[in-house]
Amino acid sequence: MTFSRRMSRAKPSAIREILKVTERPEVLSFAGGLPAPEAFPVEAIARAHAQVLASPAAPAALQYGPTEGFAPLRAWIAERMARRGIRCRPEQVLITAGSQQGIDLVGKVLLDEGDTVVVENPSYVAALQAFESYEARFEVVGSDDCGMRIDELEAVLLRSRPKLIYLVPTFQNPRGTTLSLERRVRLAQLAAEYGVPVLEDDPYGELRYRGAALPAIAAIDEAAPVIHLSSFSKTLSPGLRLGWAVADEKTIRMLTVAKQAVDLHTGSLAQHATARLLETFDYDAHLKTVCALYSTRCEVMLAGIERHFPSGTTLTRPEGGLFVWARLPSGLNAQELFVEAMKERIAFVPGAPFFAAAPDHSTLRLNFSNRPPEAIAEGMARLAGCIARLQDQPRAAVG
């Protein structure tokens, strides 16, 4: 069998390949971006499904549905987005199979071979994978504790005309950082001035534990061409596979046509049940519970790193989301540490795959949402022991 030229360039996700090994029950894993299963509103989800299946709407919930999505769910999302300052109508909402599908659809409708996508360095690895599948090239800009370096982005816009700007502005994956208000405003201004679309990937935006909420980029300047993506995966359950895209009606129409060729529509039963759930379920109270749970786990992880990791380790201090990003002292390689840690059945994700260029091999991403505090404390102590052993070994210089 001869595969397409495009697929000959495709690479498997380094993260997903790692997860095949690290998610075994005997492994204490901080690798995946998994929400806590105890935070899933199982009874409410089950009750909503039962109510839909016992109602006159059951045949529709088990039938093919419109590609754009179930109308009541689109209306709920539009209202929710409006509360966050993103003015939109239900017609400007497309239901997707998770926000990852939204990323892929945007790549499909915007990118031709050789087009340039501007990304943070490091960036969300599955987005890099999606854009590479459409044979895009990357222009990387740096990031710091305040998010994407907008001064570097402006320099890119001055010398070239990229097709798309992609970023996770709030609790970024992998670094956990948040784009400052000043930079958000400037990014929206630049997008409007140069006419370059921004893909604002926002799966974690409602998981804030501390600090003041910041407006979405899509809420700042209506003249800016912004496609906003979000999801129920981190707030209700990833198993529902429900995300959404918000954009102008022309863009939503193009994304809808692209989705028709992929899966016809997102699962009807999940959409109907989630819409029913949201009619009576206290979603905001649920979010508060989830945020309190994750806030504690984040603090335990930060404390464990500070207590046990060697001098010279640097780390981010996220205000929300699921991840802490750490950089090991000079000379230590996170991939080598991963091999050492797996001997002790401890797992994380080495940072290098998140870089579109010039990878920093001393970095690693740690997930705190999926483990209880006592396991996080134990894991950080054990991982520090692995670092100490690695420091005592002869090793090659870090790239």
Image (cartoon, helix red, strand yellow):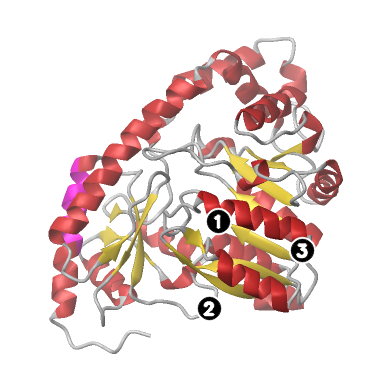
> What kind of secondary structure does the magenta stretch mostly adopt?
helix
Q: What amino acid type should be assigned to the residue bearing mark 3?
A: Tyr
290 lies left or right of 355: left
Nearer to the camera, 92 or 183: 183
| Span colored in magenta | 374-383
User: Which of the marked residues, 3 or 2, is nearer the chain's N terminus?
Assistant: 3
180 lies left or right of 112: left
Asked if residue 387 is positioned above or below residue 346 in the image, the reply reads below
Residue visible at 62% across and 37% down?
A: 242
Q: What amino acid type should be assigned to the residue bearing mark 1?
A: Arg
Where residue 54 sits: x, y (%)? 65, 10
Nearer to the camera, 43 or 234: 234
Tag 3 and tag 1, C-beta contact below 8 Å:
no
Check if residue 377 falls in the magenta segment.
yes
Cα–Cα gap, marks 1 and 2:
23 Å
Q: What amino acid type should be assigned to the residue bearing mark 2?
A: Ala
Tag 3 and tag 2, C-beta contact below 8 Å:
no
Tag 1 and tag 2, C-beta contact below 8 Å:
no
Where residue 359 sits: x, y (%)? 45, 77
Secondary structure beneath disc 2? loop
Asked if residue 75 is positioned above or below residue 1 in the image, the reply reads above
Dot 3 alpha-carbon crowd within 10 angstroms: few under 14, some 14 to 19, many 20 or more: some
Cα–Cα gap, marks 3 and 2:
25 Å
State the mark number for residue 357: 2
Secondary structure beneath disc 1? helix
Q: Quadrant of residue 337?
A: bottom left
Residue linked to disc 1 = 183
Residue linked to disc 3 = 194
Check if residue 20 falls in the magenta segment.
no
